[in-house]
Amino acid sequence: MNKRLPNFFSPRNIAVVGASTRNHWFANMVECAAKAGFTGRFFPVNSGTDEVCGIPAVRSVAQLPDDIIDFAAVIVKSSAALAILDELAGRGIKNILLISSGFAEAGNEGALLQENLQVLCRRRDILLLGPNCLGFMNIGAKVSVFAGGAVQGELVPGAIGVLGQSGATSEVIVTKIMKKGLGISLYVTTGNEALLTSEDCLEYMLESGTTSVIAGFMEGFRDISRMKRIAQDAARRKIPIILIKVGRSEKGKQAARSHTGALAGNAEIFEGFFRQYGIIRVDTIEELVETAGIMSRCPLPGGGRVGIATMSGGLGGLYADLCARLSIELPDLSPETVDSLNKLLPDFAQPANPLDVTGSGFREGMDKIIRIMLDDEHIDILLPISFAPESASEEFIPGFNESFMSLIHSASKTIIPITFREVNDYARKYYRDHNTYFMEHAEDGFKAVAHLIRYAQFQRRFRRIQEKI
């Protein structure tokens, strides 16, 4: 890992060259920093005004205060960017975010400009993020140098690191993570990666000590050999890497090249590479968020056999079909489990897996039903029904949930509630406060369960191989 990255991602005094009210970039940056709880200072640089967005400005880089600026964001035309970076380096400011576009993604002329940019950064010892990117949010450290304006929701610190070669797409990912009631450690957009690469950021996340799951949107890799080493390190640390990797189709590869200048590569080769090194590949943002959520909140199961307890035969059939399609094993209940459930449930109930506890049965005490199923030697993961509370004024629903939610963090098996009704913001906070992952949408939720099972299987294989080395 580059030893400068901890300071790079934790600046306190930030110059913003090209800050202006004629575009939204600086205003977005100030707003995002406030939402993150940033207590440092911004120093706008604008040749035509003494203040930007109510913040005192200086007219040139030369007028910035001495010795306190530890980071700069640059928002100027690509043709002027190199001269600005050179001037900043002359002032000793060498941690820089370049938001400007018009480089390798813009064709041959832009590619040449980016090559010159790389030469300058190496000659002047500049650590550069970008160009053509939105910046980063170090939410755990309450620092944000981020120029995007589409991240919604409360910026909650947590264990998920987010990496995006596409700024706007990753904003959608971060928003959905926040809306899910999950938390983020570090969120970085890398753009064209003229100097700092996705591999650099992945290494930093792995070694930071604040990230236990990494979710990313990737258009291409710069160094496959290095990615192999990163994946092996992630496996040793039990930190799953979950990626949307575009480029399965020729049109997808073309889109990647025109966006950040990335090389999308051969889809089949990447598929094999991911499987071999335990990288979890997903196809949609929703699947990415659900998988990151389940990995951040749920322990790895000892096996892949799933038990389901719901209160609807129809839902049980739906879930069984999803499990069959995703190769999730639904074992028969043991005779002992069936006997115990028969004693607890109404006479008309038919104990099976999936289990329909019936409308009458769930009133007998879900905690008792859950304990019986947890004792079944055939079950490794249990998915019980849960009612998402709509407000703090409800009485029955929280009591019903908490009759078995207390088992989630004490049981030796993985328990993942499936919500029965729509989940609002209050309910998401409710589950977050209980540090509980919940399945809200069956399709993506069961895909996440399948990824959890396969990652646990990968970890067991990886450990056996490591023991033999």
Image (cartoon, rainbow, N blue to C red):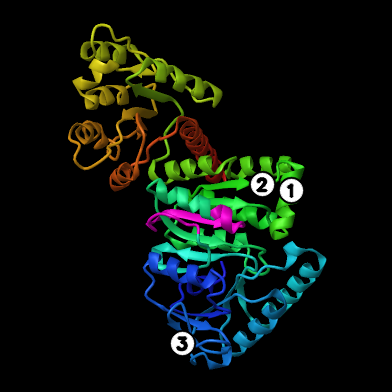
User: What amino acid is at disc 1?
Assistant: Lys
Classed neighbour count for the residue bearing mark 1: other residues with Cα under 10 Å, few (<14), some (14–19), many (≥20): many
Of residue 384 and residue 78, the one placed in the foreground of this image is 78
Name the element at disc 2. Answer: loop
Q: Could you tell me which residue is drawn at 44 percent across and 17 percent down?
A: 317
Q: Which residue is mark 3?
A: 68
Report if residue 157 lies within the magenta region. Answer: yes
Query: Can you say whether 24 is above or below 379 in the image?
Result: below
Give the residue pinned by disc 2: 246
In the figure, residue 375 lies in which quadrant? Answer: top left
Q: Position of residue 177 (x, y in %)?
A: 44, 49
How far is mark 1 from mark 2, CA to CA? 7 Å
The answer to whether the residues at label 1 and label 2 have Cβ atoms under 8 Å apart is yes
**Residue 74 sits in quarter:** bottom right
Q: Could you classify mark 3 by the number of other residues whose Cα lies within 10 Å: few (under 14), some (14-19), or many (20 or more)?
A: few
Which residue appears at 46% of the width and 29% of the height? Answer: 304
Please state the extent of the stretch shown in magenta in the rendering.
150-170
Mark before the other along the chain sequence, 1 or 2: 2
The residues tagged by marks 1 and 3 sit, at their Cα atoms, a distance apart of 43 Å
Give the vertical position of 294 relative to 68 (above or below). Answer: above
Sequence order check: which comes first, mark 2 or mark 3?
A: 3
Circle 3: element type: loop
Visible in this render: residue 214?
no
Q: Position of residue 239 (x, y in %)?
A: 48, 50
Say which amino acid is labelled 2.
Val
For disc 1, the marked residue is 253
Q: Is residue 68 above or below residue 105?
A: below
> Relative to residue 312, is residue 438 depicted above or below?
below
| Element under disc 1 | helix
